[in-house]
Image (cartoon, rainbow, N blue to C red):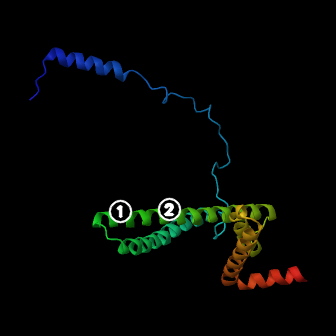
Amino acid sequence: MFNMDDNERRNNQAVLNEYSTIQSPYFNYDPSILSQSTQSEYIYLEGAGSKQRGRFELAFSQMGTSCLTGAVIGSLRGMYTGFKTTSMENQTTTYKRTQILNNIFKSGARLANTFGTIAVFYSGIGVILQKTRDCEDELNTIIAGTGTGMLYKSTGGLRRCGIAGVIGFGLATTYSLITSREKIKEIGKSLFS
């Protein structure tokens, strides 16, 4: 065991007493310095009182879900391509495994990036439309879908930009018709009345 003589004990006790008299500057403060407001100091999320989340809060889950969906679909496509390519070659098992894994990771990352970019465009356009129009309706969804398609293929020329806009319009309109058929009818009546 550890034996300590009396002289060492006294020295250790003196050191402890010396440090116990030092006070921390973090514990010595005047509470009157801090502001004493009567209002609550909480930050509320957009739409906190409602049972439905706003478009901005939904944007993050949409982007994450899109990236994961793209990664899964791309990985499955890469696995299929990898098996198809390596079955025709007469190579070792290690080479085939490496080729399959390369196809899985490259294709998965490529499609995840594509889906994520489209989700960022769609969410950004949707949030901007909601803030400028000060309402959240299916018209925002349709315009955001059309704008996303056009923006995503804008570097491919006018023809590709138009085709992508039509595809975005079709997908957004189909989604809006499936989720809220009655609201679309009301919007159509108000636009053409």
Asked whether the viewer can see residue 140, the reply is no
Q: State the SS at label 2.
A: helix
Depth check, mark 2 against mark 1: the one in front is 1
Front-most of residues 104 and 176: 104
Judged from this view, the residue extending furthest toward the top is 7
Front-most of residues 183 and 154: 154
Disc 1 residue crowd, few under 14, some 14–19, many 20+, Cα 10 Å: few
Residue to which mark 2 is pinned: 109
Q: Is residue 72 left or right of residue 193?
A: left
Q: Is residue 70 left or right of residue 96?
A: right
Numbered label tally: 2
Q: Is residue 170 left or right of residue 74?
A: right
Residue 179's x, y, as percent? 66, 81
Q: Amino acid at mark 2?
A: Ala
Residue 101's x, y, as percent? 38, 64
The quarter of the rendered structure image containing the C terminus is bottom right
Q: Amino acid at mark 1?
A: Thr
Q: State the SS at label 1.
A: helix
Q: Is residue 11 left or right of residue 188?
A: left
The quarter of the picture where residue 114 lies is bottom right
Q: Which mark is residue 98?
A: 1
Residue in view at x 65 percent, y 50 percent: 40
Q: Which mark is residue 62?
A: none
Q: Earlier in the sequence, mark 2 or mark 1?
A: 1
The quarter of the picture where residue 119 lies is bottom right
